[in-house]
Image: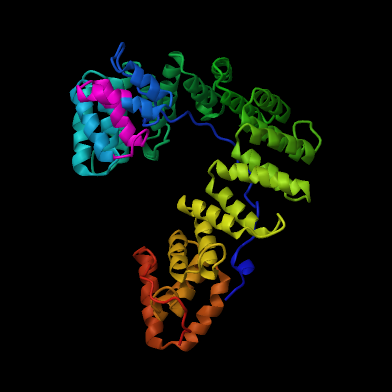
Amino acid sequence: MKSLATLFAFTLLSISAPAAITLEVDDPILAEATPESPVTGTPDSPAKAAIEAFNRGRHIEGVRLATPLAAAGNADALLILALAYETGSGVEASRDLAIEHYRKAHKAGSTEATTRLARLLTSAGEKAEQEEAWELLKQLSEKDTGTAALLLGDGLLRGSFGDEPDFEKARFWWSRAAEQGDVSALLALGRLLDGDFGFPEQRDPAAALSQFLKAAELGDASAMLAAGSRLLSGEEKLRDEALGREWLAKAIAKDELNAYIALGNFEEAIKKDDSAALAEFKKGAEAGQSDCMLKVAAFHLEGRGGLPKSPEEALVWYKKAGEAGNAIGHVQAAAALLKGEGLQIVEGYAHLLAAAESGPADVQNELGLFYLSGRLGHWLSLAAAAWFSRSASAGYPQSAYNLGALYEQGVGVPKSFAQAGKLYVQAANAGHPQATTALGRLNAAGAGTKQNLPQAWALFSLAMERGDKDAAAPLGELTSQISPEQVEEGRSILAGFKEDKKSLPEETPATTTPPKAK
């Protein structure tokens, strides 16, 4: 078996530099009355104290105050209990109890409960519940067009209210709300027409811009950003520099600092004026916009905009971006610092840890590799396994493969060929070449699964096609050991993996000690 060092690809902080930053308006769909958003309730509600406590994070107190009022049928109190059960705030989470209390609050007249109930039922994937949500929203649309229309359009785009996503029906509902001046609907409709939700054949940039401009006229800062950025850098026939600058200036006045990115990108990409671009990025950086800090760092690193090349100044700005909560800033600072020695390693590790804690799965994988690199003076295999696990749970194939290697050798986790196999399956189903080879190796040896030589042959062959040259040796060895009939069976299995797009196999553990292939 290979050593642990050869099983892992130690590409520490080989994460590529960020591509050009693009602009999107914040997704308005489902932005209202999410489980995390506060309870509004009715004015002068008897449950006012309960609402205030719950919204301030004193969930147990909020539930305690709401319980007797809910028993008496108060709609706002029922709403609080429903939200508590949905989110597990102050009580043990229970979807069934959440739905029960939302239904009671809905019957008691709470519009807020109706929207939250419809949202919860829509997300379940159960046809009966989605039909109930559809009826609730249709009824709600008669008195609260905006909120109901947003939810109806969103459900139609997700295929929740039909056999497949429906562009035309979604546009109908969002247009209905937009005609009433609902800003969220205008933004959603603009994004739909701009192709942000698919349907490229329906894309209409001019119509999208029109919706953004309507929302901007109503004072929405994100719409000002969307309109201004498209007027500057969108399709050439729609560009209007003076008007674009005007809307971005208004967005900045409303503290929409992403407008500086739009201005800088315009100067850099359209006007080809690095000095002017740097000036805009610096304004944004000094105002606290972390993506602008990344751009300033890149200009220092590359020596652009009249600046001399200065990795030292770039590092200063990467650190500032990290301190402002930008994961890429932390990653870039770590990449620079971990090239050094001594205290720089410790500082770089701190930036890498901060980036991983913010959630990017590839960075979490890098942190796991760092713990195995010995750069802190010793291996921290238990910590590596924990971060690989967190990243693999987020669907990152490389981490699933890395964690499988730890289980295969019993490093930082109990030795388990079966668990290694499950992780290799997860990574291989995502197309990971080395995981496909590893899965073939376990199948060939009967390690953690029933021995299946034709399937091992198919997996080694698939790994070769996916680009793992290391699969050639075990494939050649296995081919020389098995019968022509088994090779033919392997070809059939390989064709099934490729043509039928079947998932790779995950079998019940059979052994703990791998026998040798015959």
Above or below residue 401? Residue 299 is: above
Magenta span main SS: helix
**What scheme was used to colour the molecule?**
rainbow
Image quadrant containing the C terminus: bottom left
Residue visible at 44% across and 22% down?
Answer: 212
The span picked out in magenta is 65-94
Quadrant of residue 328 in the image?
top right
Q: Is residue 152 visible?
A: no
Say whether residue 10 is left or right of residue 436. right
In the rendered structure, does residue 85 fall within the stretch colored magenta?
yes
Above or below residue 488? Residue 68 is: above
Q: Which of 440/110 is in front?
A: 110
Which residue is situated farthest in the top direction here? 44
In the rendered structure, does residue 277 fall within the stretch colored magenta?
no
Quadrant of residue 444 in the image?
bottom left
Quadrant of residue 117 in the image?
top left
Coordinates of residue 408 in the picture (x, y in percent): 51, 69
Above or below residue 233? Residue 494 is: below
Q: Which of 283/332 is in front?
A: 332
Coordinates of residue 76 in the picture (x, y in percent): 28, 21
Image quadrant containing the N terminus: bottom right
Above or below residue 299? Residue 423 is: below
Residue visible at 22% across and 23% down?
Answer: 140
Residue visible at 27% across and 35% down?
Answer: 98
Coordinates of residue 225 in the picture (x, y in percent): 52, 23
Say whether residue 134 is left or right of residue 186. left
Q: Is residue 488 visible?
A: yes
Coordinates of residue 387 in the picture (x, y in percent): 55, 52
